[in-house]
Image: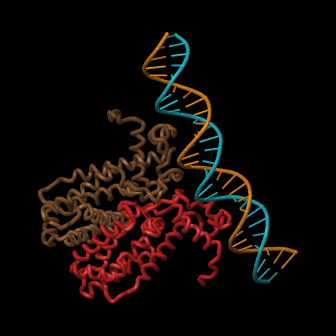
Chain colours: A red, B brown, C orange, D cyan
Amino acid sequence: MTEAAKDTVRQRLLDAAVRKLESNGPESLQARPLAAEVNASTMAVYTHFGGMPQLLDEVTREGFARFDAELAGVPHSGDSLVDLLALGLAYRQFALQNPQLYRLMFGLTTPGTRRAKERDLTTDGSPSTLSEGVSAFNHLVGAVAKAVESGRIHAEDPVAVAGQIWSATHGYVLLEIAGVFGREGHGLVTTLRPMIINLLVGLGASREDVEASMARMSGAGR
Amino acid sequence: MTEAAKDTVRQRLLDAAVRKLESNGPESLQARPLAAEVNASTMAVYTHFGGMPQLLDEVTREGFARFDAELAGVPHSGDSLVDLLALGLAYRQFALQNPQLYRLMFGLTTPGTRRAKERDLTTDGSPSTLSEGVSAFNHLVGAVAKAVESGRIHAEDPVAVAGQIWSATHGYVLLEIAGVFGREGHGLVTTLRPMIINLLVGLGASREDVEASMARMSGAGR
DNA sequence: GACCTCCTATAACGTTGTTATGTACAGAGG
DNA sequence: CCTCTGTACATAACAACGTTATAGGAGGTC
């Protein structure tokens, strides 16, 4: 586990898969073209991953790792509400810049590998069991907990409140990716920002407090 | 357009496709097995639909039609807040009973037909352009508008507010389908109901008013 | 040199969506 | 009754997919 050679065939395959997914969609993730792109044989997919489903699992894991890193990189200010808002915007930012990856992470895509023999056929893919996904969610839980501790909002169970904020942001982001809100940035001001503000106000924050915190963020757009 | 013979090959194919999708997942929607299930030749898919992508488009349209009918069937009480809450629960009900169909409707699945030559490669499928989808959304907009008119909540733009409620419910439902909230009904009480309540409170409704309306619904579970 | 192990390259198999080609049957006009 | 026409069906073939089987080659250890 030395995290050694980065330029191995396995790593190149994984990187190419992420790149291909994001630029050409899930149906472009095919064994032969993928292997050819990194000058490897088709068999490399099987020797290094075991098959396309396992390779996709690794892509998902990679996606959650990047997502987690992105959310971890959100700077902590002294203002817990500002942090909470910043987290929501960073969430949107990641999803919009990696829409295909985001949908794959949450099991909302079924790539070309339809040879689905033994994939979890319980009901669906439950990505919440991935440790990186849990870690990403915990950033949100922590921000909520701090806001509760500092008395900015009221909540009995920070985890439940985080689930609410997660649900709302998740749904908004997917609809924005689908193009429901029209041109770039339009949904942000008409939907996401007021929705989060309304949620926080419903959680006991004063509207003036929230909007002041919102204004305290740089540009409020990014 | 007489909407005549229901028992035509085309209709049987469509019905079988919806049933197969919901029971066996998107990857099970394959031309040969589907045609065999209704005792038709594989070519029937092409003579009646033109190909698998077009058949899937019809399945999507059928899904939105059912969704629209489901939301239209929500009874209107005199209480606009009750109606709004009932709409949200009916929304969840439909999505949970037809998870595969729901995801297909919102472009969140890429079924077996990866022979995607001419599908909308702009960025993604934008299902909002389907008239049935717009109709379903308008039910929500109407309910919001009534709540605003009756002074139960405050909103400058009912469409924008409907977009917020839609986003939140959409995201919650997808996470519940993915199994994030654990056992049946758990997410409803810990996440969806309080989230909607918080949103409405943030929109100017009094918490007592909302919770009274919520209690006024039958069982509050269905 | 001989052996083992890992990775790679080529070829083949079964199944997918799709296309091409031939066939059956209904109705219209003579 | 025959023929023409058009729509729906059935059979077979094609390219491409994931996957498997099998053979070849590089690097270390004895």
The percent coordinates of residue B203 (x first, y second) are 20, 70
Residue at screen point 46% across, 61% down: A109
User: Depth check: A61 or A46 in front?
Assistant: A61
Q: Quadrant of residue A71?
A: bottom left
Classify the position of the N terminus of chain B by image quarter: top left
Classify the position of the C terminus of chain B by image quarter: bottom left
User: Depth check: B217 or A196 in front?
Assistant: A196
In the rendered image, the vertical position of residue C3 relative to residue A111, given as above or below: below
Residue A117: tell me if it is visible: no
Residue at screen point 46% across, 70% down: A97
The percent coordinates of residue A151 (x first, y second) are 24, 86
Residue at screen point 49% across, 72% down: A63
Q: Quadrant of residue B207?
A: bottom left
The percent coordinates of residue B24 (x first, y second) are 43, 53
In the rendered image, the vertical position of residue A152 relative to residue B212, given as above or below: below
Residue at screen point 32% across, 53% down: B133
User: Depth check: A199 or B89 in front?
Assistant: A199
**Left or right position of B146 against D27:** left
In the displayed image of the protein, which residue is found farthest to the front?
A219
The percent coordinates of residue A35 (x first, y second) are 64, 64
**Left or right position of B187 against C9:** left
Q: How many marks?
A: 0
**Left or right position of A33 against B196:** right
Residue B16: tell me if it is visible: yes
In the displayed image of the protein, which residue is found farthest to the bottom?
A78
